[in-house]
Image (cartoon, rainbow, N blue to C red):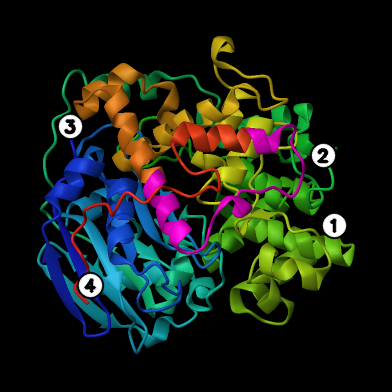
């Protein structure tokens, strides 16, 4: 089985030392990316770690495909205990940093401890340098990038950083890279902020070489010649469809259709797109550099999830207003889904849907924990009682779009996801709109036959995250291509994905998670029976816990 190569580099912030550890055995079992980071975290992070404490460890990992020149591989994984959910969580980002991390020669970079002053870390194939950066206290994402460019002659593609939200421990703060690409969900930016690290740069000349078996160039060629609407509109291409079937959350989840969906959907975004955008080595080029010259707003996106959270869910019917919220979140370093939903909860409490000035003001207050922003920075789950609104979250994570009240399999996926209410954990929604071939599709209503399919999809998504492969590769990555690229039977590859999901679940079980956390704020038909089927398909206990099968076999932490 093809897997990543390189060592584990541990950066101890407390005593400012680094250690390299051989992790070949972990790489052989878990390929790379999310799998390797999950295995390391499972065995090296205390089960009772405070997400903001020095004992929490933040991992950056790539996979074997980042050593190739293949489309859909410009992604990097990050893993830690989430300040938002309290569970072990992985998030990945596109852009260009993945190959710079690969160039350091390390398969994984682990950050532990905390600094007594604000610092930047420069990780290369020759070592790690600590840079005191007191002048970057409160700096925006673009300002951090400019500092690195001026002082180190490195570009945005070398940088992972936090904005003010990360420094202020906003529970849904992002790690940002290439200025506009986010490790979006779960608050990993707040983990870096709690460690007093403003940014990490990656650079070097020690990347391993990988020659993909078979016709590796064919994936790149297919990406270049695809006529997918996502190359023009990104994920916003699904907006009108979601609205038509009643799966577009609106006015803080009070409704499932938005009367002005066309004003903020795919055509509206495409009209503001002024050039192509892509990730490292990818010919699919689905990104959305947009601008509005009249108001002087320029950003990348918004994607569909942001169109929901700061558009329909906030009662906003102008795409330029959504673009503005998107840009503010990128600069402050916040997940647009969680931030938008939390702002929408506040608008619901105040009876102010559609108040764009209040939205703009509130985004800034959240990033700086000023006034009501200090309450909202905790997220919907912790703030809803004070606001007097429903708790629209799962495991503390705010809902993404693709409403599970209509797309019931996606609803089940939200409930059981180790990450919380995140659509990318299984992408079951694609089978219910449907966005797949008719013979693969499911009726949106009901849960019959869906738990077993959900297990398969979660395992496949985890496998992709070990690669690390973009979700948009799903139309091009057949089982045969997986087998060709990774040099193993597809069933064996799915077993790797299953083990990753199980390790996440076991870690979270040790932190107190069980069946009672696999819930929804709405009812689905035969939900409890479907939960039983899901647990049975996974071989888990009926209380949602994993039979204890030991650790992942990673090298123990040096305490």
Which residue position holds label 3?
Answer: 1
Answer few, some or many: residues within 10 Å of disc 2's Cα (few below 14, many 20 plus, some between 14 and 19): many
* Quadrant showing the N terminus: top left
Please state the horizontal and vertical placement of residue 513, each as a whole percent of the image. Answer: 53, 58
Q: From the viewer's perspective, is residue 44 above or below residue 54?
A: above
Quote the CA–CA distance across marks 1 and 3.
Answer: 52 Å
| Mark 3–mark 2 CB contact (< 8 Å) | no
Sequence-first tag of 3 and 2 = 3
- The image quarter in which residue 352 lies: bottom right
Name the one closer to the observer, 248 or 58. Answer: 58
Nearer mark to the viewer, of 3 and 2:
3
Which residue position holds label 2?
Answer: 258
Question: Which region of the structure is painted magenta?
Answer: 502-529
The disc label shown at residue 353, or none: 1
Name the one closer to the observer, 145 or 192. Answer: 192
Q: Is residue 516 magenta?
A: yes
Quote the CA–CA distance across marks 4 and 3.
Answer: 29 Å
Q: SS for tag 1?
A: loop
Which residue position holds label 4?
Answer: 11
Please state the horizontal and vertical placement of residue 284, each as a whole percent of the image. Answer: 41, 30
- The image quarter in which residue 205 lies: bottom left
Sequence-first tag of 1 and 4 = 4
Nearer mark to the viewer, of 4 and 3:
3
Please state the horizontal and vertical placement of residue 265, each as a whole percent of the image. Answer: 70, 36
Nearer mark to the viewer, of 1 and 3:
3
Answer few, some or many: residues within 10 Å of disc 4's Cα (few below 14, many 20 plus, some between 14 and 19): many
| Residue located 48% across and 40% down the image | 287
């Amino acid at each position: 089985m093809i897997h990543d190569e390189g060592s584990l580099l541990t950066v101890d912030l407390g005593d400012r030392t680094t250690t390299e550890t051989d992790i070949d055995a972990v790489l052989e079992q878990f390929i790379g990316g999310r799998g390797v980071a999950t295995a390391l975290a499972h065995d090296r992070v205390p089960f009772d770690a405070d997400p903001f404490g020095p004992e929490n460890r933040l991992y950056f990992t790539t996979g074997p495909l980042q050593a190739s020149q293949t489309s859909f591989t410009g992604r990097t994984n990050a893993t830690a205990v989430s300040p938002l959910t309290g569970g072990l969580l992985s998030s990945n980002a596109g852009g260009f940093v993945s190959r710079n991390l690969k160039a350091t020669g390390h398969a994984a970079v682990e950050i532990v401890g905390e600094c007594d002053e604000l610092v930047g870390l420069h990780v290369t194939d020759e070592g790690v340098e600590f840079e005191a950066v007191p002048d970057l206290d409160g700096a925006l994402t673009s300002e951090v990038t400019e500092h690195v460019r001026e002082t180190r002659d490195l570009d945005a593609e070398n940088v992972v950083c936090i904005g003010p939200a990360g420094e202020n421990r906003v529970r849904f703060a992002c790690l940002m890279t290439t200025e506009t690409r986010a490790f979006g969900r779960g608050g990993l930016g707040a983990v870096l902020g709690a460690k007093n690290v403003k940014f990490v740069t990656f650079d070097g000349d020690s990347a391993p070489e990988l020659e993909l078996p078979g016709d590796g160039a064919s994936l790149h060629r297919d990406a270049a010649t695809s006529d997918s609407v996502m190359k023009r509109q990104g994920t916003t291409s699904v907006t009108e469809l979601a609205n038509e079937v009643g799966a577009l959350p609106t006015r803080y989840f009070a409704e499932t259709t938005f009367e002005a969906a066309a004003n903020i959907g795919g055509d509206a975004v495409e009209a503001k797109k002024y050039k192509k955008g892509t990730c490292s080595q990818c010919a699919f080029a689905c990104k959305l550099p947009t601008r509005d010259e009249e108001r002087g707003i320029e950003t990348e996106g918004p994607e569909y999830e942001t169109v929901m959270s700061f558009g329909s869910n906030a009662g906003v019917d102008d795409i330029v207003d959504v673009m503005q919220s998107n840009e503010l979140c990128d600069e402050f370093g916040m997940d647009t889904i969680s931030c938008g939903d939390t702002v929408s909860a506040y608008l619901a409490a105040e009876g102010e849907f559609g108040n764009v000035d209040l939205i703009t003001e509130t985004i800034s207050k959240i990033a700086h924990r000023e006034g009501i922003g200090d309450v909202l920075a905790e997220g919907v789950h912790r703030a809803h009682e004070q606001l007097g609104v429903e708790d629209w979250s799962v495991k503390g994570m705010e809902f993404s779009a693709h409403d599970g009240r209509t797309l019931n399999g996606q609803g089940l996926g939200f409930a059981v996801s180790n990450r919380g209410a995140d659509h990318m954990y299984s992408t079951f929604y694609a089978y219910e709109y449907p966005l797949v071939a008719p013979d693969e599709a499911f009726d949106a209503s009901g849960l019959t036959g869906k738990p077993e399919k959900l297990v398969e999809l979660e395992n496949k998504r985890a496998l992709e995250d070990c690669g690390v492969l973009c979700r948009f590769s799903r139309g091009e990555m057949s089982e045969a291509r997986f087998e060709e690229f990774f040099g193993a039977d597809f069933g064996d590859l799915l077993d790797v994905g299953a083990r990753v999901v199980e390790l996440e679940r076991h870690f979270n079980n040790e932190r107190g998670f069980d069946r009672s956390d696999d819930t929804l704020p709405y009812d689905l038909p035969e939900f409890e029976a479907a939960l039983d089927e899901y647990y049975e398909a996974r071989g888990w206990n009926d209380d949602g816990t994993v039979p204890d099968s030991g650790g992942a076999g990673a090298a123990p932490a040096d305490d």
